[in-house]
Image (spheres, rainbow, N blue to C red):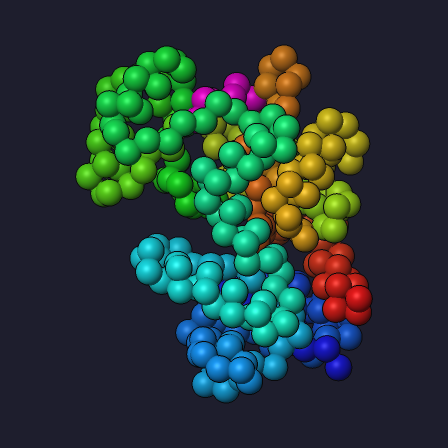
Amino acid sequence: MLRAAVLHSSPRPPWSTARLLHALARAGFETIYIVWDMLGVKTGNDCRLLYRGRCAAFDALLVRGMGRGLTPEKLVYRYGVLDAAERDGVLVVNPSAAVRTARDKMASIMKLMECGISVPDTYVYESPAAALRTVRQLGKAVIKPLMGSLGLGSFLVDSEDTAYYIANLLAELNQPIYVQRYIEKRDARDIRVFIVDGEPIAAIYRISSTWKTNVAQGATPAPAPLNGPHIDLAIRAAECLDLIYAGVDIAEDTQGNHYVLEVNASPLWRGLYKATGIDPAPAIAEAVKRRLKR
């Protein structure tokens, strides 16, 4: 029997992760839920990835959370764990390199642009003065953490005073300053498209009374059509970043232009399920199974 481990930083499986464990079991996998401190890495020819101090015996490792508030050293180590798993022949989902790129907003936005995918004008600096000049030029901008999720730590700025304080705070925290042109969204909503193996599984509008449209920040999910320019854009974005599955966030501006804002390599889908009744977990499980049988 194929063995699939689902990896997270939470002691107990969150909702989306629990759905994935259930779908994997129904697809015929022996499943196990693990957290990061159960894993380790060693040198040697017998194995590189350790689980509870012994050679890990996984066919697939599904990464559902890298963790938050990590030091640079711990983040590098965790990427190294995923690399070690791949060197041992374990199928890592999403792949280690793809997770690394998607998590890094600067790297992902640059790669998306290179793939010819529409993204908002984006600037990254260490200098608060340079960030302030850019906000002055753009008029209205979003300042985000270089790594983050759920809309946490993102600020909409439309004044130099606000930009000055946020940029200087980030500089004092030794953080880069990520500045992105704000897209005035049509009908105060954006679109999340869930892609598995190059196919759109479901799509939702995320409607909000504030500028943040994350469901985790209180936005209301509603079904969105599975056709149109947002679907093609989402498929291309997931393919560009080499993701087996992804949640692609797209903004449509008031003129009908579409932009990829972000691509999530370990998306949650409770809001999507609530709005559409579609659970992507079985499709993810089948995508993993297909790859292992090749």
Quarter of the image where the N terminus is located: bottom right
Along the line of sight, which residue is nearer the eye, 215 or 87?
A: 87
Relative to residue 2, is residue 181 drawn left or right? left
- What is the span of residues highlighted in magenta in the rendered image? 180-186
| Residue 12 lies within the magenta run | no
Q: Is residue 203 visible?
A: no
Residue 31, image x, y percentages:
65, 76
Residue at (72%, 50%) from the top-left corner?
A: 196
The one nearer the camera, 60 or 221, is: 60
- Residue 71 in the image: state x and y as whole percent: 31, 57
Could you tell me which residue is drawn at 49 percent across and 82 percent down?
Answer: 44
Reply above or below: 44 against 130. Answer: below
Residue 257: image location, x then y, percent:
64, 19
Asked whether residue 24 is in view, the answer is: yes
Looking at the figure, which quarter contains the C terminus?
A: bottom right
Question: From the viewer's perspective, is 110 left or right of 132?
Answer: right
